[in-house]
Amino acid sequence: MTYYLSRRNFLHYAGVGLASSIAATPVLSQAQGQNPLRIPALLTGQMRAGVRHYDLTMQQGSTEFFSGINTDTLGLNGSYLGPTLKLVNGEQASMHVRNTLGEVTTLHWHGLHVPAKADGGPALEISPGTIWDADFTVMQHGGTFWYHAHTMGQTGSQVYRGLAGMIQLEDDETTQPGLPNEYGIDDIPVIIQDKRFSRDGAFSYIGMHRDVMAGFFGNTVMVNGTLNPYFEASTTKIRLRLLNASNARTYNLSFSDNRQFSLLGSGGSLLETPLPLRSLVLAPAERADIVVDLANGQNVNLLSTALPSGSPFLSQGMMRNMQAMNGEVFTLLTLRPQSGAETSAELPRRLTVIERIPEASAVRTRRFQLGMTMGMGMMGMRGGGGGRGMNANTPFNINGQSMDMSVINERVAVDSTEIWEIVNDTMMMHPFHIHHNQFQLLDRNGQPPRAEEMAYKDTVKVGPGETVRFIMRFENFSDPDTAYMYHCHILEHEDNGMMGQFVVV
Ligand code: C2O
Ligand code: CU
Ligand code: CU
């Protein structure tokens, strides 16, 4: 790893970052020196008696993001982040998760359709020094998912320190001819996260009221834990599995030469056909499976730029100024095509068929109003060492109720189809996520969803003033005693009340 920014400059920039205005801070990752993109190990598990076993150890570690500077981090089977898990549709999987962290944690499979007891939500605590086993059959469309800590009140802190990784769920469609599919060669995980480094190189987390209200925004963006990364492509097309694993930041992604790329899927499944786009908005927990054509041999940067002025996802009013560096241009990843690159196949015309769930099949509509109370102090807010207990002063709620482990907010009948209507009367966008299954978007403010939102999804952006409706089948896994979660995926909002629980009975 080479990192050319001198330690002196680094300390200078980091120092500025700690001073009042983060918005004016130069971005560390945009110094001249580039580093090869780290590719997380691929964990394919071990097949024993028809079951594929995966061993994950949650551990403390130290990671050298800046040359010569060690940052305390958390990871799985390594010092920072975790391996990419390859799951295969139709197989039985058995996860063995060992907690050596010295603190309570949980591990959730975001987007997977699994029994409540295997879901890894906040009730499924893994005590320090113990192993948690989760068994399930993989039974859903192939796509790009992820796993992360989901500990009550500590999700933001634990994910920020590194407890997250990617899941690539394969089926016949995600591996069909024409789709780049060689891990680390032409099928590349791109885990995007923003951080704030303190003077000594430590991760700095919540420090101000606004870090909770707007969510935590860093001043440095990393991909797979690599600062200022580049990737040398040996094929003329590469598939990027984009995952926004940031606590709160939304990225408006495009390429530096404004080239077109193809969107294959949005996480929960492929789209019916590849969709040509020039930009894509990725909120926390959203994924996008894209293919970029590098046949012209030119280097190109994956960028994040400010949301355009007409975007429905822009914050309004006072919330606008609370999201540090939201207008900044970040260079996330440089793609360097190698000379003599192997020519990739043409993309298939048709990727999958998505049968739309008829609206008339829904037995009911549930309404969820997202709420936030402004003007509270830091009192009662969680994150960065706050208490794990329930606190009545939480600034966020859904339908007026803040997350309470002892309250089951909703009971859903197994095998029923429901419409959920998410209403956002606040001044900022909230990415709404539901456990248990994938949904189909019905409409946004009464308008049909955009083409890029027509695959199965588990997380949807709900802009300020918007109402979004989706439809979902609550198949399998009835369990009156173990809840699934629904929540905002801005982790500081989730940790501070914008979450609820439902059981499938
Ligand atoms: Cu990404 Cu409730 O989870
Ligand atoms: Cu989830
Ligand atoms: Cu939120």
Image: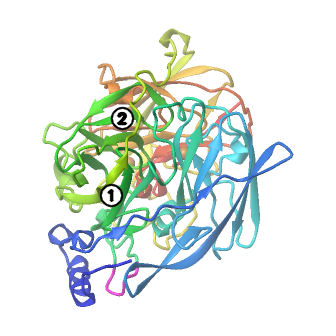
Image position, residue 116 (x, y; %): 69, 42
Q: Secondary structure at mark 1?
A: helix
Which quadrant of the figure shows ligand 2? top right
To which residue does mark 2 refer? 263
Q: Is residue 348 magenta?
A: no
| Residue at the far right in the pictured view | 49
Residue at 22% in and 73% down: 31
* Amino acid type shown at disc 1: Met
Q: Nearer the viewer, residue 58 or 494?
A: 58
- In the image, which residues are magenta? 198-202
Residue at 46% in and 35% down: 179
Numbered disc in front, either 1 or 2: 2
Report the magenta stretch's main SS. loop
User: Which quadrant of the rendered structure holds the N terminus?
Assistant: bottom left
Graded by Cα atoms within 10 Å as few (under 14), some (14 to 19) or many (20 or more), the crowding at tag 1 reads many
Asked whether mark 2 and ligand 1 are closer than 8 Å, the reply comes as: no
Q: Secondary structure at mark 2?
A: strand
Is 127 placed above or below 111 here? Answer: below
To which residue does mark 1 refer? 213
